[in-house]
């Protein structure tokens, strides 16, 4: 049994893939998992070479794979490279996403499709190509990143973002059911507003204090407060959890 103080050993020599790992929550999770000894694969559109080089210079084992997660061929090639290099894949964190603020009448079909492809189809594609490997291993941890917007609603984001994040919840619950016989855990986290580049790009400066006043815990989340929950779900400590929807939202319902 893993005890709490052994938590960090859990990641030693595991192979972990994190999408959207060049910024924000994805970068912070990937850096944490790498620092605990996992072979950590940073997937992002533009690559995360600088971050990875810095980790490797400290004796960690990180790899940067540039990949657009909405493109099936790129996803398939990236997963194949990881499997050929390490021979197993233990953790997949589907975190990449984009956000847009717009009212429904102003959303073009192109924007709708882009948000759905980046936020939801990407989770399907990464799982589709990782699942056969995890099934063969009879083990694996998949964590999908949704949002308070997908579990409840959003005061800021467009309906395409909210719909993609709600989709991640249904996707997670069904996949958890399909994969339970193979001892693969699939869970979804629903962060609320967190200080990251995405929030900086979407939160109008004058709205910040109003938002803080509306949060029961009285503050916007730090990245660490999201990272800790994702690490818990990626570890053995959550071994009996699958299909769970985890709100990390300061008490906002
Ligand atoms: N920050 C918040 O307030 C907040 C709140 C709720 C949910 N979330 C969710 O948390 C996750 C991380 O958000 P963040 O705030 O760290 O965002 P961020 O914008 O800082 O990072 C998003 C990452 O996704 C990558 N990405 C986008 N499109 C991609 C594509 N097609 N292929 C590969 N990579 C792609 C970006 O390059 C970036 O690295 C997202 O799923 C987001 O929806 C964030």
Image: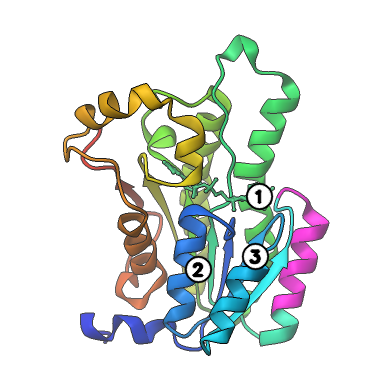
Cα–Cα span, label 1 and label 2:
18 Å
Residue 135 in view, yes or no: no
For label 3, the residue is: 48
Residue 226 place in picture, x, y as percent: 35, 55
Question: Foreground residue, 190 or 47?
Answer: 47
As drawn, is 170 to the left or to the right of 118? left
Does residue 26 sit above or below 122 in this rendering?
below
Choose mark 1 or mark 2, whichever is in front. Answer: 2
For label 1, the residue is: 122
For label 2, the residue is: 30
Cβ at disc 1 under 8 Å from ligand 1: yes
Q: Which residues are magenta?
A: 70-82
Residue 103 place in picture, x, y as percent: 55, 14
**Quick check: is 78 in the magenta stretch?**
yes
Question: Foreground residue, 179 or 40?
Answer: 40
**Marks 1 and 3: CB-CB under 8 Å?**
no
Does residue 149 sit above or below 85 in this rendering?
above
Cβ at disc 3 under 8 Å from ligand 1: yes
Residue beneath the point at 51% across and 77% down: 139
Residue beneath the point at 57% across and 85% down: 57
Cα–Cα span, label 1 and label 3:
18 Å
**Quick check: is 76 in the magenta stretch?**
yes
């Amino acid at each position: 049994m893993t005890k709490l103080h052994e938590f960090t050993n859990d990641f030693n020599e595991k192979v972990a893939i994190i999408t959207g790992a060049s910024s924000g929550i994805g970068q912070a999770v990937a850096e944490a998992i790498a620092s605990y000894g996992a072979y950590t694969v940073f997937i992002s559109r533009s690559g995360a070479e600088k971050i990875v080089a810095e980790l490797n210079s400290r004796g960690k084992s990180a790899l940067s794979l540039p990949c657009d997660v909405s493109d099936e061929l790129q996803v398939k090639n990236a997963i194949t490279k990881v499997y050929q290099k390490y021979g197993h894949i233990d953790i997949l964190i589907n975190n990449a996403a984009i956000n847009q603020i717009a009212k429904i009448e102003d959303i073009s079909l192109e924007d709708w499709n882009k948000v759905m492809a980046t936020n939801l189809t990407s989770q399907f594609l990464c799982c589709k190509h990782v699942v056969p490997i995890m099934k063969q291993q009879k083990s694996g941890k998949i964590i999908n990143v949704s949002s308070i917007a997908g579990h409840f609603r959003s005061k800021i984001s467009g309906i395409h973002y909210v719909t993609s994040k709600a989709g991640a919840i249904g996707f997670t619950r069904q996949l958890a059911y399909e994969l339970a016989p193979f001892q693969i855990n699939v869970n979804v986290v629903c962060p609320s507003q967190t200080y990251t580049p995405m929030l900086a790009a979407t939160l109008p400066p004058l709205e910040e204090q109003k938002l803080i006043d509306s949060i029961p815990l009285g503050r916007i989340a730090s990245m660490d407060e999201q990272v800790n929950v994702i690490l818990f779900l990626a570890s053995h400590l959550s071994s009996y959890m699958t299909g769970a929807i985890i709100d990390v939202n300061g008490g906002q319902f």
